Amino acid sequence: MVDRNYILAVDLGTTKIKLAIFDIKGNLIDYTFSNYPLKIERSHVEQDPHLWIEGFEKGIKRLKQRGKLEYIKAITVIGQAPTLVFLGSDGEIVRDAILWLDKRGESERNALLELGLPFDPRYQSLAQILWIYHNEPEIYKRTKYFLQPYDLLNFYLTGEVSSSGIPFRDYLPWSRDDAKLLGLSPEKFVEITPIGKVVGTLKKDLMKEWGIWGKEVLVIAGGIDFVGALIGTDTTSPGKLCDRGGGSEGITVCSQEPLPKEEQRVSSVPFFISPFWKISGLTNTSGKAIDWIKDLFSIKTYQELVRYAKSAPYGSKGLIFLPYLSGERSPHWDPYAKGVFFGLTLSHTREDMIRAVMEGVIYSIRDIYEIIASYDIPIRHFRTTGGLSKSDFFNQLKADIIGVPVEVPYISDGELVGAACIGGLGMGIYKDIKEASSAMYRARRILYPDPIKKERYDELFSLYRELYPSLAPRFHR
């Protein structure tokens, strides 16, 4: 038998699950994915967790058929969060999961604010649990454990209930202490297994089904997807920025120093690698806004969408789009913010609107970037990752609008690379996360800003920034 030590990296996302096989040096051996829908009703956003398992099983079947699965030695699952999963006493799923996009916890925010919880409480699973406690008491009673999506998949793989992540309050959607203070049952919350630690081994029946023989397969604690993206882009030391684009978008800088406590537009918490700080801002809809305009015009592929955007002039003839289609997090923290086309005229075309949406998404990223940069935090590398980073047109737009060189990775799914790094750490291949991250990350190219386009985008961005303050009172009405 060939001696290969492969890692199965899994990213359980908001609309798709991705599976990739890596070797211990970070080379991509195989890849597949499956899509699944959301259930959206007003401010409630849910998902059937059975679809995650089905999507995973479909991916496993494809990988097995291609002959790469038998060499798996470790599995790491990361994914969307905070998304609330309800697990019953006999291992059944009690109800649909409540996603991170869901806003029903807004009515519970004051109880969380009194605890001084990090980030905005509207987006914490603890607020959603309080809502369930008050509005669906039978569901609360039937739930033995509250989990995150990656925890549920680890349960499917091992038969053991666990909770993966970084055991710092700033990285978790809840803690037992917080739950107890709120009058919730602390035993419903599983102790955290730190990333890189073994949570169990692959069940024997799955090993047989997958065609794996011999030694056991380790299941390694992963956690929230944004941490995977930071690790997968080697954003593990000061001066590095990770711009993670998916359904939403997040900018994170590793810094030597925190921001002032009075700065509330973006967050500043200890980095998971001491003694650094994680400076970050999160938008609500980046990829989702682009999906929206794609579906609105019945466009079948992203390649076609990009062709339309390329055919419009830069600046979209002065058309500006606010991408607040599901409220907004950084820098406004306003669940009532709405999407807006500003400056629309009879001369504007479908192509202009598509490009304006892409530009608007990047204006929202620049908004966060400029807040962070205003504190003179050194940023030497602007690294992009996620689905949107597959488009060099979109990457070049970022460079032109933000005015910085954009570093594009060889593998666009940084979360999967990060999961592979964590798997290598759990296998004992690497001594720490920094070593694993440095070994596996590779840049494909660097795109530089066009100074002529940048000048026009500066003018439009100035207008963009003026729109929200003037419209916010009307959003709330």
Image: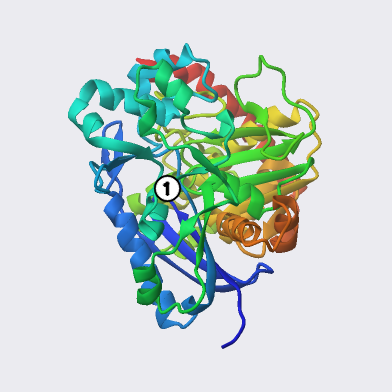
Rendered residue at 37%/49% (across/down): 152
Q: Position of residue 230 (x, y in %)?
A: 64, 47
Image height of 38 relative to 305, above or below: above
Where, by quadrant of the figure, is residue 345 drawn?
Answer: top left
129 above or below 440?
Answer: above
Location of residue 462 by image quarter: top right
Measured as percent of width and height from the top left, residue 386 is found at 56, 54
The residue at 53%/23% (across/down) is: 332
> Which residue is tagged 1?
151
Place of residue 427 in the rendered image (x, y in percent of width and height, measured from the top left): 62, 62
Residue 60 sits in quarter: bottom left
Observer-nearest residue: 154 or 320? 154
| Looking at the image, residue 112 lies above or below residue 208 | above
Q: Nearer the viewer, residue 153 or 405?
A: 153
Q: Secondary structure at mark 1?
A: helix
Q: Is residue 347 above or below residue 124?
A: below
Report if residue 184 is visible in the image.
yes
Q: Dot 1 surroundings within 10 Å: few (below 14), some, or many (20 or more)?
A: many
Three-letter residue code for mark 1: Asp
Residue 336 position in % (x across, y down): 39, 23
